[in-house]
Structure formats: structure tokens, C-alpha cells
Amino acid sequence: MSKTASRVAGIVISALLAVFLAFDCLTKILGVEASRKGTAELGFPVGQTAVIGWVLLACLVVFLIPRTAVLGAIGITAYLGGAVTANMRVEKPVATFVLSAVYVSVLLWIGLVLRRPELLRVLGLRGRAD
């Protein structure tokens, strides 16, 4: 795949995930009943739903700024790690609920690496000669 095609694929993946995560933020911040119910089912106080949405939104904004995208990806990955833990705690189905946050994290990083292939070298996944 050419560098241009890789970059475009990375932008598309990142944009689709950003829309998905922005929708999740908004449902939490606006207090949509389904979000409040999901928060309660996970054992969190319903009043914390908006706070959870604001935290994700902050990470998403940092991710969307090209200079700080890596920091944003780390923040979103940490946020989704919390989602994995919360779903495991209440014994949600593994493949659908627990691992869905892992799937999103993997796609997030794939999109970022396709946009910025030099990250592979920084992570030690590609040698200097590549």
C-alpha cells in the first residue's frame, strides 16, 4: 500500500472512530436515559455519567489535534481500559461487551499508525533501515 493510501486509510479509520466516540460523549454529557441506565448497570453513580462523558471528550479532543494525537490515543486507551474492567466486574459477556473496548482501542492505534507510520519505529516495531 502506498504512503498516500495508508494515510488516507488511517484518516478514515480515525474519523469513523472519532464520530463513534463523539456520539458516546454526547449521550453521556446530555444525560440520555440509555447512557444513564448503562452507567448504573456498571455500578457507577448515575450522577457521574456526564463526568465520564467529559473525560472521554477531553481525550478525544486531544486525539483530534495532530500534534497531540498520540497523547489522546493513550488517554482514550486508558479510558477504554476502564470500560473493560467495569464490564468484567459485573460479568458482562466477554466477546461482545468486555472486548468491544479492546477492539476500539486496536482500531484507534491502527488508524494512528497508518496516519503516522514513524510511530512503529518509536514503538520498536520497525528497525531504522525500514
Image (cartoon, rainbow, N blue to C red):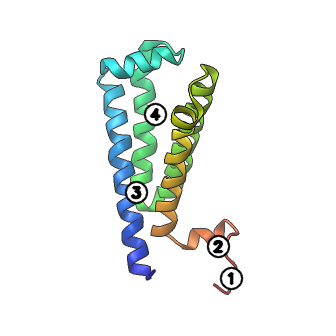
**Circle nearer the viewer, 3 or 1:** 3
Q: Quadrant of the N terminus?
A: bottom left
Tell me if label 3 and label 1 are in contact, CB under 8 Å.
no
The residue that label 1 is drawn on is 128
Which SS class for mark 1? loop
Q: Quadrant location of residue 31?
A: top left
Please tell me the numbered disc located at residue 121: 2
Separation of marks 4 and 2 at Cα, in angstroms: 30 Å
**Circle nearer the viewer, 2 or 3:** 3
Tell me if label 1 and label 2 are in contact, CB under 8 Å.
yes
Does residue 78 lie above or below 2 as drawn?
above
The residue that label 4 is drawn on is 55
- Dot 3 crowding, Cα within 10 Å, few <14, some 14–19, many 20+: many
Residue at point 45%, 27% (across, down): 52
**Circle nearer the viewer, 1 or 4:** 1
Separation of marks 3 and 1 at Cα, in angstroms: 26 Å
